[in-house]
Amino acid sequence: VSFRFPRVVGHRGASADAPENTLAAFRLAAEQGAGAIELDAKLSADGIPVVIHDDMLERTTNGHGAVRAQDLAGLVRLDAGAWFDRRFAGEPVPTLEATLKLCIELGLELNIEIKPCPGRAAETAEKVVADVRRCWPAGRPAPLLSCFKAEGLAAAQAAAPDLPRGFLVDDLAGDWAGTAKRLGCTTLNVDHRALDRSGVATIAAAGLVPVAWTVNDPARAAALVGWGVAAIITDRPGVIRAALP
Ligand code: G3P
Ligand code: MG
């Protein structure tokens, strides 16, 4: 499969050292030598893609309640940094658009995880695609769109058959090969704890590029790459990069 993606991908940015899914974390990932970042995209109440992991605001912001209940204007006023460290107070919840622009500026590639709030998978995928279409230069390697939900990937495929897709799975128990094939996926993004040498070989034999998340141990990352994993999604891009050839 001809698909080139940076080997070290900052999971929600350099999220061991900066508040996850903020522009500060993405900048730090670039400084630490990540070639790409992974982020989680979901929609505000008024349908704008924003970058945040949980359905609820409490863990990573000073807001309350569901992300999907807040308009963009309310979301961007929240503090998404102070919970991590006072140094990051005032970091906002970024829009996907602002994140795409930062990646262009820094020369970072990206893996946009479509992380829909309940019931919004297709709409989230469509709005993510619209942002990519509007902001991402044609000459650059296209963002990888990934999702745990087939519905999100199917909507991405319909809206943008040309953008590469990754099917996210927790393990290799189900019919991942059939689903990934049906959805025209390029990569299979697997919880690394479910991978061993033969699992990685099986993924490659199915014509998919193996990607592993979330790998924070350098020896484990080196083993996975040795087995043929193409990209390591990590909270510690600097440490993992130093450990890989
Ligand atoms: O995209 C890989 C990984 O981010 C998937 O799980 O929960 O960290 O978004 P999660
Ligand atoms: Mg994610």
Image (cartoon, helix red, strand yellow):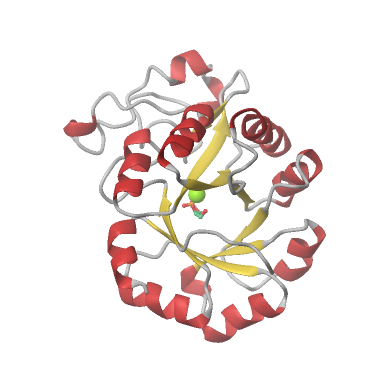
Q: Quadrant of residue 179?
A: bottom right
Q: In which quarter of the image is the N terminus?
A: bottom right
Looking at the image, is 234 positioned above or below residue 116?
below
Q: Quadrant of the C terminus?
A: bottom left
User: Could you tell me if residue 234 is visible in this image?
Assistant: yes
Residue projecting furthest to the bottom = 198
Q: Quadrant of residue 239?
A: bottom left
> Residue 9, percent across and down?
44, 56
Residue projecting furthest to the top = 73
Q: Which residue does the image show at 63% across and 53% down from the upper left? A: 148
> Residue 243, percent across and down?
31, 71
> Residue 197, percent across and down?
53, 85
Q: Which residue does the image show at 45% across and 26% down from the upper left? A: 65
Residue projecting furthest to the left = 86
Q: Which residue does the image show at 23% across and 32% down from the upper left? A: 88
> Residue 70, percent across and down?
51, 19
User: Could you tell me if residue 14 is visible in this image?
Assistant: no
Left-right relation of 83 to 126: left
Left-right relation of 186 to 216: right
